Image: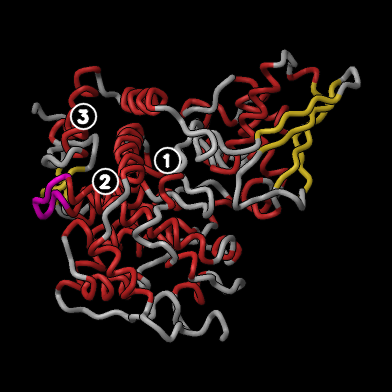
Amino acid sequence: MNPHDPIPSLPLANAVGGFAAAAVPSPAAAAVCRSLLFDIAGLIVAARDADYVRAALASAVDDGRCTALGHARRLGMYDAALVNGTAAHGEDFDDTFEGGPVHPGAVVVPAALAAAEQHGIGGAAVMRGIAVGAELMCRLSLVAPQATHKAGFHPTAIFGAPAATATVAAVLGLDAETTARALGIAGSLASGIIEYLADGSSTKRLHAGAAAQAGLRAVHLARAGFSGPATVFEGTHGLFKAFAPSRAPDFARLTEGLGTRWVIEGLAFKPYACGTMTQPFVDCALKLAASGVSADEIVSIRCKVGEGTVHRLWEPLVAKHRPPNGYAGKFSTPYCMAVAFIDGAAGLGQFTDARSQDVAVQALAAKIAYEIDPADEYPRNFSGHLEATLRDGRLISFRQPHMRGGAHEPLGEAELAAKFEANLAFGGMDAAAIAGLRGALSALASGGGVDLAVARGEAR
């Protein structure tokens, strides 16, 4: 049987619908989703004054009962999901799944919160919905690795639409049949091209919010009786045929152990505010700086990389040496390495437009090149490497065998808490507001009500 042909047994949307309707997350998956809730909330607030968030907020037509975190105005559920998702993904500091890569939190958390606020649903359903959607998104990204990027699409956008659909269906307690219809509809709402790489424009940021919005729309259409194809995933004209045509899909990666083995247990939380695959290279640059080498001593740096990362993070190399703005710098491995080496950090402050134009940073970035390593494990594992040639003839090498913050070296609770608080402070929250939001999210994650008044600047 051709792997692109429809699977003759149960349509995959029906299987996923059954999963969304009944799955109970493992304790480890539930713990990850609690961290996800806090991480995403912090990132939304951190970006609240950014121009792209203000544009998204200004585009909202209707007021409603839902919260755009960090803003006083209450929005309708579609607009709240769009604004929150765009903000959450905006600084590329959000979680990532190392097999994809995809960024589930920025999609499923905004979708779950909007559904809950719109319909008056409590925290237990929100947390289960987050787990269900994140799990689906990660598993979909494993079906045809690299093929979605190769076709020019953003996996977070494409797989985010059905993931958000599963999230909202779970939050609302929909049955398997209705959820399957909603997933069929979501296939026609999935979109998102990666041409933002050309100039650092804001459309990548929009993808998470648009996917969250699509999931809400698909579910509410299905609840009203709208239909969608049951073979949305595996069909002749289905999601993978359209968005990942170069690789035969392995649907066993989606279905095997679905509901009993939770791949989100290994979800990675980023320590640095830049692209996922740049992170291990940032660690290598920090190790080089810690060794006592100065930028003036460096003649050149050569990195061994996975072939699948080159077209997004290394080429065109001349452009990657001089990104046009801070956002483009997040997707330039040479820039990320150079700014981390010079500043000793790769946080939000290292990716401003002004910082990206620093002469010393650009000069060091221009010394960094790459070679493709056929043995690199990408996308199964994200690793980093550098070999620096110094003026005195010495060669110094560093390797990061995996992504820090991922399954091999997860961030501790203290590190995640510090990141949450730092992001809220970056977004202008004072200590009292930070404590208030922490308390509100803790109550939600423990199964209490969804009360986000403090995130709107209201007294609780």
Q: Which residue is mark 2?
A: 57
Q: Which residue is mark 1?
A: 94
Q: Which residue is mark 3?
A: 437
Q: In the rendered view, would you say 393 is above or below 311?
A: above
Q: Secondary structure at mark 2?
A: helix
Q: Position of residue 257 (x, y in %)?
A: 41, 62
Q: Left or right? Give the position of 328 relative to 371.
A: left
**Which residue lies at the image location 16% right of the left edge and 78% below the top edge?**
225
Q: Can residue 34 be seen at all in this image of the molecule? A: yes
- Mark positioned earlier in the residue sequence (1 or 3): 1
Q: Residue furthest right?
A: 393
Q: Can residue 54 be seen at all in this image of the molecule? A: no
Which of the pair 213/402 is nearer the observer? 402
Q: Position of residue 285 (x, y in %)?
A: 67, 27
Disc 1 to disc 3, C-alpha distance: 19 Å
Q: Which amino acid is tagged 1?
A: Asp
**Which residue lies at the image location 38% right of the left edge and 27% below the top edge?**
413
Local crowd at mark 3 within 10 Å, few (<14), some, or many (≥20)? many
